[in-house]
Image (tube, rainbow, N blue to C red):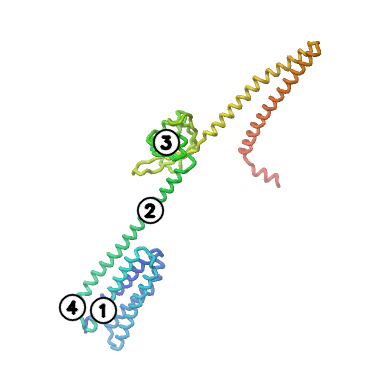
Amino acid sequence: ERPVFFVRFAQWAVAVPLLILISNRAFLAEYGHRITMMRSLPSLIVTFWSVWLSWLMEVTTVHGLRWPCMFVSAVGLLLALADQVQLCLQCRGVNLYKLKCAMLIYQIVTFIFYAGLFLSGRFGLVELSMEQNLYAYCDSTVKVLQGALLAMIRSCEDAEQIHRWYAEAVAYKKDFDTIIKLAHVPVVTFLQDGTILRLNEAASELFNSTDDKSLVGQKFTDMIRKDKKAPFDQSVQELCEKDKSAGSGLLELTCKSPYRADECYLLVNLVMVDTYQEGVKALVAIGQDLSELCELKSVEEKKNRLMAVVSHEIRSPLHGMIGLAANMMDVVSNDGMKRQLGMVKSCAARLLDLVTNVMDLSDSEQRKRAESKACTEQKVNFLAIAEEAV
């Protein structure tokens, strides 16, 4: 009679299902804990009872029960191993598939070695001391090697995940840089002290910046007109102090590039961003070129000045010509002279009507714009509308 160590069987009843669950988790990691547990539950139950059937085979006094217990225990262990092999074949597309297969093969060989050693001891092929020494040695080494393989798989998976994150970050950065570069609005990146880091193509075209005449490294604040610099500096200071990421709001800037003869007018929004250097912040000015609108405004102002000149310098002399011609027609007695004065009066009157019509047309357009603006800004009284409808 050989002694039976209950604690060893209890350890196997916990360790064997746990190793099966860990190896299945390696193949089913992307499906979550719940699916992994549901998929592994039959194998866990079978291996648990296989171990205790082996213990029952050792302690039972009924000799006719030993062989059935041993047979059912061996079949249960083989079914669990076959289920793991099937799972391995079904999950060929997982990451680190070969390394996980190597771990599974090592686990299967270990289980077969334990089963062979157990049966060899039962049939007297191995002495008791040798059997216990091999059990003690395998219990210590198997767990260490299994843990090393799992740690290796975990480290490789983490490394692949970090690599994917890095590749995605690089791709996102590349796409973002491309969007900024090809944007139709000027975008300028500069440090807190105003040093320009980069410009996109629209900003380079606006400021007439080329490779030979680059604005990179120059002060963006030096390009801003003095009367616009105070609100700009205040917005930059607020962004730097509060570390706001929402933006500064719209600012009107008048800039003068050293490589451009005339000034350009921008409507910009400032945003705080991080740079490649740790702890160094930069600002991005996303603007809209308003130079054409300012030119249209100047044209409108010139037209208003022209209308004032026309009103004063042309209409007043015409009134004088009409009045003088009428007075002279009353004084002159010569019929031919009266006809000529009448022609002068009628021509001056037609010219005055033309100038007056042009002035009225201009005034009507201004009134329409003022009325439309007033209509758009007028508040709607929904209560009065509802009472009127009822």
Separation of disc 4 and disc 2 at Cα? Answer: 57 Å
On the question of residue 248 being in view, the answer is: no
Residues 3 and 253: in front is 253
Q: Are marks 2 and 1 in contact (CB under 8 Å)?
A: no
**335 in relation to 82, above or below:** above
Q: What's the CA distance linking mark 4 and mark 1?
A: 16 Å
Q: Amino acid at mark 1?
A: Gly
Q: Is residue 229 above or below residue 383?
A: above
What's the residue type where badge 3 is placed? Thr
Q: Is residue 95 above or below residue 215?
A: below
Precedes in sequence: disc 4 or disc 3: 4
Which residue is labeled 1 in the image?
116
Pointer 2 residue: 167
Q: CA distance from mark 3 to mark 1?
A: 80 Å
Quadrant of res 200: top left
Q: Which mark is residue 210?
A: 3
